[in-house]
Amino acid sequence: MTGPSLPALPCACASLRRAARAVTQLYDAALRDTGLRATQFTLLQVLQRRGESMQGELGDFLALDSTTLSRTLQPLAARRWIKSRSGDDRRAALWSITAEGRRRLERATPAWEAAQQRLRDRIGGDPWLSLLEDLAGVAALARSTSA
């Protein structure tokens, strides 16, 4: 990795949160003109790739608590970029991306790709792939440790 550095923090949580905030700011800036925030883009992208999903499954997949997930879902639903329906158990909401949501995602993807590429270029190709795999592993291990 090249570029300015920050001192290491002695806490994994603080270090990951600092990195997440910095990366989110980068993506939010890139997406500013698309009408989406990074968190909203991610949710549309996940629904596009996974298809209709139960709200609990989305929360588990993204490691989001139900309150945070609801706060992210509601503005997207209000704009009709996603929709929900009741499942077999009426208490369970099933979410899916709408045609308008797909169009919004498609229009925003070039800005997201540009942010991805800027970060990938700074980190480097092999370290980038390792980072993605390591972060998925850290998330899985943290989830299994807290259970």
Image (tube, rainbow, N blue to C red):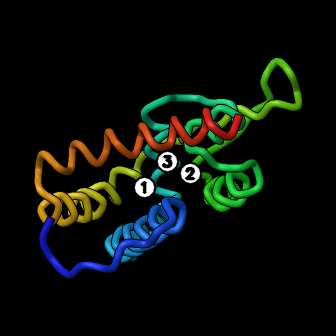
Give x and y (percent) for residue 28.
41, 72
Tell me whether circle 1 and circle 3 mark residues in contact (CB < 8 Å).
yes
- Taking the image as shown, residue 108 lies to the left or right of residue 62, namely left
- Taking the image as shown, residue 106 lies to the left or right of residue 65, namely left
Characterize the local packing of mark 1: few (<14), some (14-19) or many (20 or more) Cα atoms within 10 angstroms.
some
Q: Which residue is mark 2?
A: 81
Q: Which residue is mark 3?
A: 44
Rounded to the nearest angstrom, the CA distance separating label 2 from label 3 is 8 Å
Disc 1 on helix, strand or loop? helix
Disc 3 on helix, strand or loop? helix
Tell me whether circle 2 and circle 3 mark residues in contact (CB < 8 Å).
yes
**Label annotation for residue 13:** none
Q: Residue 129 falls in which quadrant of the image? A: top left
Please tell me which residue is depicted at 42% across the width and 55% down the height of the picture.
104
Please tell me which residue is depicted at 65% across the width and 32% down the height of the picture.
57
Q: Amino acid at mark 2?
A: Trp
Quarter containing the C terminus? top right
Is residue 129 depicted above or below 29 in this figure? Answer: above
Q: Which dot, 2 or 3, sits closer to the camera?
A: 3
Disc 2 on helix, strand or loop? loop
Front-lying residue, 127 or 75: 127
Seen as rendered, the residue at the extreme front is 10
Q: Which comes sooner in the sequence, label 2 or label 3?
A: 3
Q: Amino acid at mark 3?
A: Leu
Q: Residue 76 falls in which quadrant of the image? A: bottom right
Q: Amino acid at mark 1?
A: Arg
Q: Which comes sooner in the sequence, label 1 or label 2?
A: 2
Please tell me which residue is depicted at 56% across the width and 42% down the height of the picture.
142
